[in-house]
Image (cartoon, rainbow, N blue to C red):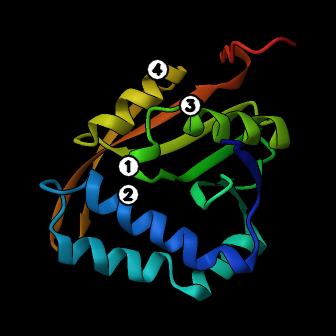
Amino acid sequence: MDYKVRSAKKEDFTAIQDVVYTSWHDTYEGIIPRDIQDEFLNSSYSNKTMQQRIEYSHLYVMESDKRIEGFANFSPVSEEGVSILYAIYLYPDTQGKGMGTKLLEYAIDELSPAFIHLNVEKDNKKGMSFYQTKGFQIISEFTENISGHTLYTCKMELDVNRYNTGRAS
């Protein structure tokens, strides 16, 4: 099966929303109550918010012959050379097959940031493992309150100049 990364289009909204709900429900089961997940996702991934993501940030999808398998959302690069990774989600059956890495590398190639920052829940073991394997370092930890639920969050940073993609230059 062939996979390709491309910029998202309005026609992708429904597929992206399906990826994010499926991925969140799989990842955060037992970490964040389902009703709080859905409240957050309904706000953060509404059609209006998706349109803003396309207009004001960089939204990329991983597409197979059959469907959109996942997506990543990055901020524009700041004057300091930092891009924020807002989200990277894949269907659970797609995880562990290198697609998250391809999305990350595509964004690095497209945006040329010096650093990538992100926030990840400390209890998100799959996410923490993925980011640490890619070379992200924890630079701070803090708590967040989402609808009365406390989350323990790590802010991580990738020095892109030290990122070894394993690709031939």
User: Do the residues under discs 4 and 1 have CB atoms within 8 angstroms?
Assistant: no
Question: Spatial distance from mark 3 to mark 1, Cα to Cα?
Answer: 13 Å
Question: Spatial distance from mark 3 to mark 4, Cα to Cα?
Answer: 12 Å
Q: Which label was assigned to residue 98?
A: 3
Q: Between 139 and 95, which is closer to the camera in this rendering? A: 95
Residue 147 visible? no
Q: Position of residue 166 (x, y in %)?
A: 69, 12
Q: Between 16 and 121, which is closer to the camera in this rendering? A: 16
Residue in the picture at 27% in, 70% down: 37
Question: Spatial distance from mark 4 to mark 1, Cα to Cα?
Answer: 18 Å
Q: Position of residue 39 (x, y in %)?
A: 30, 81
First reached walking from the N terminus: tag 3 or tag 1: 1
Which is closer to the viewer, label 2 or label 4?
A: 2
Residue in the picture at 28% in, 42% down: 124
**Residue, disc 2:** 23
**Residue, disc 4:** 133
Q: Quadrant of residue 25?
A: bottom left
Query: Helix, strand or loop at disc 3?
Result: loop
As displayed, is residue 165 above or below residue 93?
A: above
